[in-house]
Image (tube, rainbow, N blue to C red):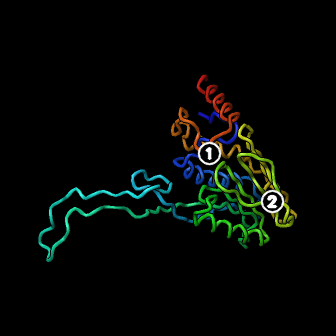
Amino acid sequence: MPSPFPGMDPYIEHPEVWSDFHSGLADELRAELNRVLQPRYVARLTPRVTYEVVEVDERRSVRPDVAVWRASSSTEPTTGVVGAIKSAPVESTVEMELPLRLHTVEIRETGTLRLVTAIEILSPVNKRRDHQAHTDYLRKRRELLRSDAHLMEIDLLQGGERPPLQRPVPAAPYYVTLSRWDRRPYVEVWPLLLRESLPVLPVPLLEPDPDVPLALGSAVSAVYDRGAYARLIDYRNPPPLPALTGEEALWVEECLRAQRAR
């Protein structure tokens, strides 16, 4: 069953769905590019690992608000140990971090493996100022912008702090930016509204080769189908935070009613 929405599905932004979606989208973009790239180029996935603090009980990718502590259920003193050991110790927790694997889609020149274009799919940790991955991503972004490689950033997350641009752009929940190395500091920006279909994007290569098309909407739909998100997502619940505007919320409900009526 397809998504109820013509473009980005805001329910995919839920923490329980996003990590799987991010990996699936990176893989789908690589496959789509390799179908249209000429033999001079190859698209590859480059993983990087960061760590995310998780709740001890829920195992969700959020920072706990308070420490968890409890008294030990055993009140009997330990036997067979020299010296007195106080019974009923207090039990607490330490921060628990789990690895989070993120992927960059890289187009490289075959033979030399020269980086031609980097496609970054932003994740919540990239956009959270208090997370190390935010600092790491901005550092990587600066290095790419100083290089002779093109940089495309795909931001399909409404929340968090977006990578900086010097000039304001129209407000939208989602964005794609493209920085061609030979046109810097100017960048191309696609503000994407919730009710819009996702665009076909131009992916630049080396001169004199023309751009190749990247159908973002088709890729997102393919990942949605393969991930069986129609069964995973409970559309009876409201969309995940950040909260939609009143107009957006009404439109989302209309899409869900139309889906239920089919």
Q: Amino acid at mark 2?
A: Pro
Regarding mark 2 in the picture, which secondary structure is present there? loop
Rendered image quadrant of residue 220: top right
Looking at the image, residue 18 lies above or below residue 136: above
Looking at the image, residue 80 lies above or below residue 163: below
Regarding mark 1 in the picture, which secondary structure is present there? loop
Residue 214, image x, y percentages: 75, 51
Q: Nearer the viewer, residue 89 or 61?
A: 89
Q: Which mark is residue 204?
A: 2
- At 58% from the left and 63% from the top, the residue drawn is 131
Rendered image quadrant of residue 244: top right
* Separation of residues labelled 2 and 1 (CA atoms): 33 Å
Looking at the image, residue 169 lies above or below residue 97: above
Left or right: 203 as drawn, with respect to 223: right
Residue 117, image x, y percentages: 75, 63
Q: Nearer the viewer, residue 114 or 217?
A: 217
- At 81% from the left and 59% from the top, the residue drawn is 204
Residue 219, image x, y percentages: 67, 46
Q: Which residue is mark 1?
A: 242
Rendered image quadrant of residue 102: bottom right
- Name the mark nearer the viewer: 2 or 1: 1
Looking at the image, residue 194 lies above or below residue 77: above
User: Residue extending furthest top?
Assistant: 261
- Name the image quarter holding the N terminus: top right
- Marks 2 and 1 in Cβ contact (< 8 Å): no
